[in-house]
Amino acid sequence: MVSKEKRIEFKKGAFREELNKDAEKIMNVAEYVSINNKALLDFAKNNAFSKVSLPKWDLPVFPEKANKATISFIILGNTQNFAFTDFITKQKYVAEYKGSDYVGAMGMWASIKKAIERGVPLLDGEFLSTISYKELEEIYNSKSKIPMLQERLDILNEVGNVLCKKYDGKFYNILKGYELGKEMMFDNGKGFVELLVSDFPSFRDESDYKEIKIKFDKRAQLTAAMTFEKFLGLGKNIFKQGEEEKLSVFADYELPKVLNSIGILNYNESLSNDINNGVLLKSGSKEEVELRAATILAADRIEEEIKRFNKSSKINQLGIDYLLWSAGRQIKTANHHLTITTAY
Ligand SMILES: Nc1nc2c(c(CN[C@H]3C=C[C@H](O)[C@@H]3O)cn2[C@@H]2O[C@H](COP(=O)(O)O)[C@@H](O)[C@H]2O)c(=O)[nH]1
């Protein structure tokens, strides 16, 4: 007979298992960040019976239908889904779309939707492989300037080239056969998340911490999650049942902010001062990797604890992510950490 512990492990899949293990190794020797078990248990207990919904990605900045063009749009946006706070002014990117202002990541989605609607062929690999700085600047030009424009451009050029070489110039071809209920996120190297990371260097999101290599793959996992949730919101499952259980939370700058605010992540004095004062944390620094590793581990433990308190809970990391993310929107006072990176 398979024990309950084993069953949970099996459902997580190899990627998430490895990520959790590496996060745990890092947190065992961490210097700047620690997890407060009491706060974690309290949070799990208080949320064990909460009704958790998943995002439907139905704001006007997203396409309305569940089809191939929507899949392409979601992948395109996730090539650009990082760094929305200006590193000097600390202001968030703001873009206007159909009379409303969209802030941060939503501003980015607004700008690419607006460009596609006025005929810029942003879903076409060939166009992306040669899109220029000026053209991209024009696309993002709105109420403020988007950070890291050159990096965004380099990524689009790279992605365009790979699409032309391997995917007939089309994003949606990365999702093999477009067969409802059949697609895999992880499939021995051939799943959707795995192909994004292996074929597109800019999706690779890994860090070295002492001798530990940890793969967060935030943008690649978020691409799969958004695709899953967008389709689900319209009553369709594009992926094979259970694939979503293999995803971790998305290790960005928002989740550690929330986890710290509710006492689950504790920072030492120097890290706490740096974040409060808006000091940049170097990409790949111990501080930055610990923040991300702690986020992954804490979210995984919250799921385990919720399931201990509520044996019939079906919550997974997508639910935990949305629970924390939504909590973050209410926290207006705390700073998130600032790192110059294309990962998140
Ligand atoms: N873990 C996690 N990270 C998420 C999201 C979302 C989108 N949530 C929407 C989904 C439905 C609702 O309507 C929400 O609004 C964005 N991010 C990441 O945060 C950063 C941007 O932050 P800011 O500058 O403030 O926009 C950036 O790295 C972005 O990729 C999430 O759900 N989980």
Image: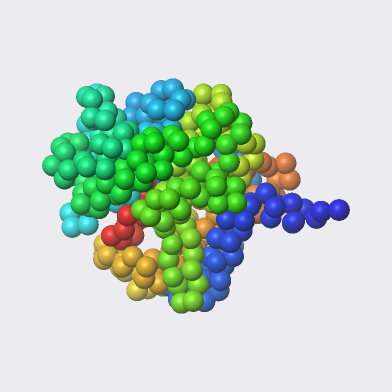
Q: Position of residue 241 (x, y in %)?
A: 65, 36
Residue 9 placement (x, y as % from top left): 69, 55
- Near-viewer residue (336 or 222): 222
Q: Is residue 11 left or right of residue 326?
A: right
97 or 79, nearer to the observer: 79
Residue drawn at 26 percent across, 30 percent down: 121
Residue pictured at 28% horizontal, 37% vertical:
126
- Ligand 1 falls in quadrant: top left
Residue 295, image x, y percentages:
49, 58
Residue drawn at x 41%, y 23% is 64
- Most foreground residue, 158 or 140: 158
Who is closer to the viewer here, 112 or 29? Answer: 112
Give the image location of residue 242, x and y in percent: 64, 40
Judged from this view, the residue extending furthest toward the right is 1
Q: Residue at x 58, y 61 (%)?
A: 18
Whether 234 is drawn above or below 85: the answer is: above
- Can residue 175 be seen at all in this image of the molecule? yes
Is the residue 234 above or below the residue 22 in the image? above
Residue 39 in view: no
